[in-house]
Amino acid sequence: MVRGILLVLAIIPLPLLHGIAGCWGRLLYWLPTTARDTTSKNLHTCFPEMQEEEMQQLIKSSLAHTACTALEMGKAWVAPIEKTLALVVETEGYDDFLAAARSDRGVVLLAPHLSNWEVLGFFASNGVPSNFMYQPPRIAALDRLLREARSRSGVKLAPTNRKGVAEVLGALKNGELVGILPDQVPGDESGVFADFYGEPAFTMTLVSKLVQRTNALVYCGFAQRLPKGKGFKAVFARADEGIYSDELDVSVCALNKTVEIATNKAIDQYQWEYKRFRRRPDNSEFYRLND
């Protein structure tokens, strides 16, 4: 059923998909949804000085972009890889990133929950030996679909466990590209608290530890959604230099700063309905919402 839905979404023109997403986003905004409440909580926390009228417009736009990301999955997952790659019509910083990815140092690509990270992953790994970490779904059939979709361009997938960490560590030592979603809330023993837009967020230490054990370079990238369904602009930039620090806290803070810099280029395209601050230093409840 999921595959069938994705096949239908893959053939619908992108401008029409974005139009449907706009309607979906308005519904998410006007109805008492958890997505709306979480988005509002996160944005008010991260941008406390923003005027309320501007804030409400940002919330509406953010929910519409979240709907875009969902509806674009057909084009990212089941469309022919050539058509997926053709969705990227502009680039920024790509030549610098590609030169690093083709060197023998190894590159960690931070791909935060910003616009369509699936499209970014396919574009960044095109022609480059690549390994992406992922969280296997609990449903076996969905896991097979996900692995089939993401690996059709030759990308190797590593699960988010010890075996997967060992795989990506070896890949970096071999000079390959490793893609990681840096803003997922990690497990108890895999993170520390570091500020994200001035708010403590439980943040993964994996990237910092991989960098400390290898000679890898770190970049951040995202596929910025262009207006009117024109496609995407693949944006790449070097991570904040602090990420290479031997001090774990300094490196993790630089990781979040790097994600912030990317997010500031397209604030409404970040996945603000994700409960980024659900872990608290004092174990208090941050999201008192519908759930």
Image: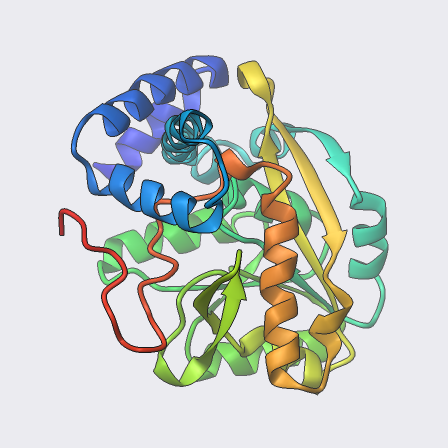
Residue 34 visible? The answer is yes
Q: Which colour scheme is used?
A: rainbow
Residue 174 visible? The answer is no
Q: Where is residue 237 in the image (x, y as percent from the top left)?
A: 75, 51
Q: Is residue 125 left or right of residue 227?
A: right
When asked about the image quadrant of residue 226, the answer is top right
Q: In this view, does 171 lie to the left or right of 92?
A: left
Q: How many labels does the image show?
A: 0
When asked about the image quadrant of residue 107, the answer is bottom right
Q: Where is residue 95 in the image (x, y as percent from the top left)?
A: 84, 45
At horizontal 44% and vertical 47% (from top left) the residue drawn is 149
Front in this rendered view, residue 204 or 148:
204
In the displayed structure, would residue 92 be above or below residue 197? Answer: above
Q: Position of residue 200 (x, y in %)?
A: 45, 67
Front in this rendered view, residue 211 or 260:
260
At horizontal 62% and vertical 34% (from top left) the residue drawn is 85
When asked about the image quadrant of residue 253, the answer is bottom right
Q: Where is residue 162 in the image (x, y as percent from the top left)?
A: 45, 84
Front in this rendered view, residue 215 or 147:
215
Q: Is residue 6 left or right of residue 101?
A: left
In the displayed structure, would residue 106 be above or below residue 137? Answer: below
Q: In which quarter of the image is the N terminus?
A: top left
At horizontal 38% and vertical 48% (from top left) the residue drawn is 42
Q: Is residue 65 left or right of residue 218?
A: left
